[in-house]
Image: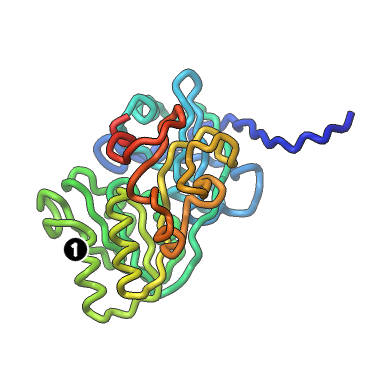
Amino acid sequence: METNCSCKTDVPRVMTIHRILEEGKGQCSFFFKSFLNGSNKPPQPGQFVMVWLPGVDEKPMAISYSTDNEFAFTAQSVGPFTQALTRLKRGDRLGIRGPYGKGFTIKNPACVVAGGVGIASVATLIDQLQDPLIIYGTRSKAQLIYLQRYKKQEMLITTDDGSHGKKGFTTDVLVEVLSSNKTIKMIYTCGPEIMMKKVVALCMQYMIPCEASLERYMSCGFGVCGKCMVNDKITCIDGPVFSGKVLSTLSEFGATARLKSGRKVSLAEHHKV
């Protein structure tokens, strides 16, 4: 029987964890052998998957590794869902939907500004750029990941407590880089939204195009639930990657987000839940 219903639904594919790579304390990457959606087409840098852990929850996770044979996402243990993930072992299974969303465009020469575990969202982008300058910051040395992965890249590291690299913030270093007349045609960023808001402001000031990947609560991944709205933009289908030009027009960027219930709250309250 034919139906006129155009409602989209996606069922998770049950996939076996092929291997787990411990990236740092409480930070693991989970690898899967199968192609996403059974397709030979690789995901775009910046796209994400919905990861379902039965009996716990389902969350969006950035694709942090992508090759012809496997893909992975990287999780940091911060709450019940990610804590449950980091207890999994090779051979355990998860439900995976996606990939979803619009990813980054590729433009060189580029600078990538990453904060905390946000570097996972720009990792496959870095893999595709030509020798990008990486500015990477965390609270302390213990949170740094991918240092071996990008050991051949020019990487400027900051930590809040000065335990590794320069004491301070990534945006402090970005100001120095932009002031040095270094040739940069594109800036990409992912991390704490207050950091990204400043990165976007600096890019507008120095008239350099940029793209940022936003983190929002998502239940569906394909534009139905509306919990990832930022003004009139739906993060899961209009993003998660947005241009700096678009973000500079969104009053909710760097200010508010929605909880699982859909209630709009300040970013500070959003990150406490």
Whether residue 18 is visible to the viewer of this picture, yes or no, is: no
User: Residue 65, image x and y in percent?
Assistant: 45, 50
User: Residue 117, image x and y in percent?
Assistant: 32, 46
Quadrant where the N terminus lies? top right
Whether residue 149 is visible to the viewer of this picture, yes or no, is: yes
In the rendered image, the vertical position of residue 228 relative to residue 119, given as above or below: above
Residue 19 versus residue 80: which sits nearer the camera?
80
Residue 193 versus residue 116: which sits nearer the camera?
193
User: Residue 182, image x and y in percent?
Assistant: 28, 79
The reply, left or right, for residue 55 in relation to residue 136 is: right
- Residue in the image at 42% along x and 36% along y: 258
- Residue in the image at 55% along x and 30% along y: 95
Residue 234 versus residue 50: which sits nearer the camera?
234
- Location of residue 34 (image quadrant): top right
Residue 236 versus residue 225: which sits nearer the camera?
225
- The coloring applied to the image is rainbow
Element carrying mark 1:
helix
The reply, left or right, for residue 238 in relation to residue 257 is: right
Packing grade of label 1 (10 A; few <14, some 14-19, many >=20) is few
